[in-house]
Amino acid sequence: MWRRSSAHMLQLSATFDLQQDVVSSIFKKEATVGRVKEYSGIVDTRILNIERDGGVLYSWEGATGTTRIGKYDPNTRQNKLLYTFDKQVCVSSCSLNKEETLLAVSLAQRTRTEERLRPVSKCLTLLIEIHPINNTKVLKAVDCRVRVQFIHPDTERDSVLESHLLLVADDGYVEQLHVMLVRQEGYRVVMLNPECLAKDRVAEEFSWVQWDSQTQRLFYLTHREKAVLKCVQFCHDHNCETLFELELELPSNPFTSMRFVNLGFDHHQETQHEREEMRMVVITNKTGSMCVCYSQPACADQEITYTIVLVHRGCSKTFSVALDGSPSPCSTDLLPLFIPIGYYVVVYLSGHFLHCINTRQQELLCHSLFLSGVDAELGVLGSDSVVLSLPESSLLDLNTGRMFTVDLNPSFLMDLLHCSRPDAQRLAALHCLLLYMGPNAALQLKIIDWICDNVMPFDTFDQIQEFILASLYRLVYKKCLSLDEVLPYSSVFEKKKVPEGLDQVPGVSCTTELHAEPVFKGKARSLQGFWEELQWSTEKMKYFEAVPNPRYRTSQNLPDWTKLLTTLKSENKKASNYLRHIEENTKQVLSMVDSWNLDQKVVPLFQEEDSQQRALIGLMVDKLREHLNRHLPRLGKKKIDVLVVNYVAKLLELIRRMLESVWLKYKLGPLVLCLKQQGSSAEWAVFHVMCRILEATKTLCLPLPPGYHTLLSVLGVRCLPRHTFLQYVDHGVLQLTETFVSRLMTDLDNSDANEELKFSILKRLPERMEQRICHLWDHPISSACISRDYVRGLLEKHAKTKGSMFMERDEPGFRPEFLPLTFLTKILLDVEDRALNPFEEQENVDARFVEETALKQTLILLGFQDK
C-alpha cells in the first residue's frame, strides 16, 4: 500500500540564511570588542549581490555609526570583512573582483536638510583597493542609479593583474572599465594609472537588462520600432561581442523605467516590484536551449497570461490561466516567477498555480505538469515572502534573507502516479521522474513497482511504452539538442490522433506561434559551444518543419519486419547477404550487453539463440542508423553508429532490468523453470506483467532480449490451463521456441495429459523444427516418425544416385511402409553400405533402428505391448 507523503512539488533546500550565517557571526565579532551592548538586538544586514562563485556580498551598520561590507563564502562557510565606511552610507550596488583585490560600490546619496543648497549627485560610484585597503577612486557621480558588476572570466592563471568592471546605468547604457593592476612590495595590489582607466561602451538605449554570471552574458532589450533582445558575450580574453539578436512581439513600451535582472539588490530604491508592468527573464541551458519568459499582471478579468519563447524550437507558447477569487485591480503581486530547473521552466504564482513547462518536449500540454490549489504550495516560504528567482535553480526570500536551491520532488511526483489523478498529470509526472531525475536505481525500482501494481494500460497512454521510450531518450538527450526532433520520447505520437485527455489540460490553455528567426552575429570563432548549438538547432528546425516524419517511429518498422520474417525462410544468396548484415548488427549489440552484465543474472535471458529476436535487433539498428544519417548527418557516421548500438543495447538491458525487478518483487527462484509443477499466484502475476511487456513492445515493433519468449512460455505452461495455453500460442502471444519445446519434451513424462499436450505442440511446429524435436522425445510415435523420415530420405537419395527396383514401383497408392519388414531391412542395409557417407552424422538412426521401431509399433497395434 502506497502512503502519500506530505511533500510539495518543489523541493527547497536552504543554502544560506542571513541571520544564522552572517548576523550571528557579526554579533560574535562585536562581542569580542565589547560593543554588543550598543546593539539594539537587530543588525540591519542586507544582501547586496551574489557573485559567480556563489559568494554573498552584504552590508550592515556597525556599532559605531559605520557601514561595513562583507562576503560570505559558501564553500568555507566563513565571513570576511571587505571594507568599512567611517559613516553610515546607503549601498545600492556592490561587486568584488575574482581575485578579491578590488571592490566596486555604488552609493545612493540622500540630500540632508542642511545640505539642500549644495548640488549633490544621487549616485556615487567608487572603486576601492582592498588588498590591502588603500586608494579609492570615484568612477561616477551622476543623478541616475548605477549598478556595478565585475566580469569573472574563466582563466587558469593564479595571478591576474587586470580586472574588468561593468557600469550599468538606469539611463540605459553599459560601460566596461579595464583596470590594470600592479603588485607592490610583494603583496600589495594597486591600480596602475587609476586616473586614466580605459573604457568601452558596450550597450545603450535599452529599458531592460539581465546579467548571467555563470555564462558571462549580458542580455538587454531595445525598443525602437520593435522590441529587440540582444546578447553580448564576454570572453576569457576580456573581449566582448554582440552575438545574438531576436525580435520579440511585446506590448508597446513594456517597461516605463529601467529593469535590472541579476545585477544585485538595491534596498534603497523604492520597492520597484510593486511598480513592475511586466516581468521578463532569459533562461539558457548549456545544451543549447534558450527561453525568453515574460508575463504581465492579471487584471480585472482575473486571467493571467505568460509567454515562453522557445528560441531553440523556433516558436513561442502563450499560456492562459483563469485565477480563482474575486476580481482585483492590476497588481504585481500577481506576476509569476520563472524558475529554471534543468530543461524545465517552472512558472509559479503564489497561492494560485505552479506550471512545470517542458521546454524540450513542448508539442503537447500533457508533457508539462500543471498544478493548482494545495498542490501548488511551496511550504517553506510564507505568504508575506518577497521571493526572487536566481540563476542556477535558486530562490531568494528578500524579507528573511534566506536562499534555497530548488528541485523537483520525486516523492511528490510518485504521489501523483499512485493517486487518482487525470491521465495528463500522471503522464507529465512520469516524464519528470524518468527524464529529469536521471539514472536513479532506487527511483526506477519504485516506478517499476508502480507499473506492476497498475499493469493494465491507462485510457490514454500505455505506461510501459512510456517507461521504455522515455528511459531510452534520457540516455541520449544531452548529446545533441536536435535529437529531440528525431528520437521518440513518448508513445503518444504513435497514435493516429492524440486522445482528448492528453490534448487539453484542465485549468490552462495554450496557443503556439512561430517567432522571428534570430540573427547570429560575430566571427566564427565566437560562435562556439552554446552559440554553435543554438544556431544549429534553429537552422535545423526549418529543415524539420519541411520534411515529413522527422521523428523516428519504431512502429514504422512493421512492414520491414514482416519482409524480414519471410526472408529468414528464404535461401537465395541476396537474402543471405542481407541476413549476414543484420546478424553483424545484432552481434555488436549483444556483445555490448554482455560486457555490461558480467555478474550473475537473476533472470535467465541472453542464454539462447533466438533467431527472430536477433533479426529484429539487427533490423532496428539498421533502420535507426539509416534514419539518423538521413536527418542528422552533422553528427558523423562513427558517432551515429556508437549512439545507435548503445541505444538498442540499452533497450534490451532496460527490459532485463524490468524483469529482474519484477522477479525480485515476487521472490521467484530457479524452480519456476521446472515444467512439472503448477505455477503459484506470484508466478501468475509475473506472467501477466511479462505479457503486458510483450504487448507494449510488439505494438512498437521493439525487440526483446533473446530468451524472453522461452521464459514466457515456461510460465505459461505452469500458470495456464492446457487449452488456454494453446490458445495463447494460436493467437501469437506465446511463441514455441526450440529451447522451450525441447525442455517440454524431455521434462514432462508421457502421461495421457502430457502426451496430448506434446502432440498438440508438435502439430504447431514448422516441419524442420518438428523433425529436430522428434529426436528428443522418447516415444513410439516419435520413433515411428523418425523411421519414416529416415527411410523416405534414404531411399529418395538412393534413387537420385543409382536408381532402385524398389523405387521404380512408384504406383498410385503404393506405400513402402507396408512391405514385409525383412525385405525392407535388407534393402536398407544394402543402401547404407553403398550410399551413406561415413562422416555424415545420422543421430543414431540406421536400418536396425528402423527394424526395431517397426516391430515395436506392430506389437503395440496388435495389443501385445503398452506404449
Image (cartoon, helix red, strand yellow):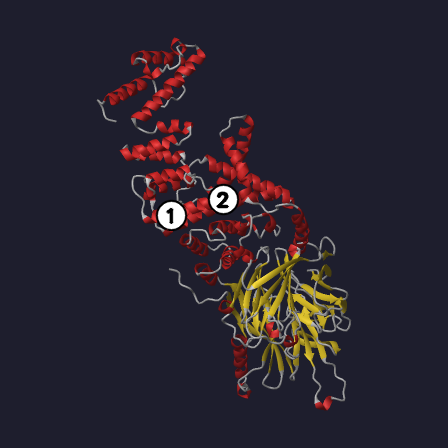
Residue designated by label 1: 686
Report if residue 489 is visible in the image: no
Q: Residue furthest top?
A: 805
In the rendering, at what x and y percent does residue 673 appear? Answer: 34, 41
Residue 34 lies, with reference to residue 550, above or below; the image says below
Residue 642 lies, with reference to residue 45, above or below; the image says above
Residue designated by label 2: 699
Of residues 560 and 129, the one nearer the viewer is 560
In the rendering, at what x and y percent does residue 518 appear? Answer: 71, 57
Along the horizontal axis of the image, is 504 left or right of 99?
Answer: left
Q: Tag 1: Cα neighbours inside 10 Å, few (<14), some, or many (≥20)?
A: many
Quarter of the image where the N terminus is located: bottom left
- Mark 1 or mark 2, which is nearer to you? 2
Q: Disc 2 marks which amino acid?
A: Thr
Q: Residue at x 52, y 73 (%)?
A: 381
Disc 1 or 2, which lies upstream in sequence?
Answer: 1
In the rendering, at what x and y percent does residue 276 appear? Answer: 66, 73
Rendered image quadrant of residue 188: bottom right
Q: Residue furthest bottom?
A: 114
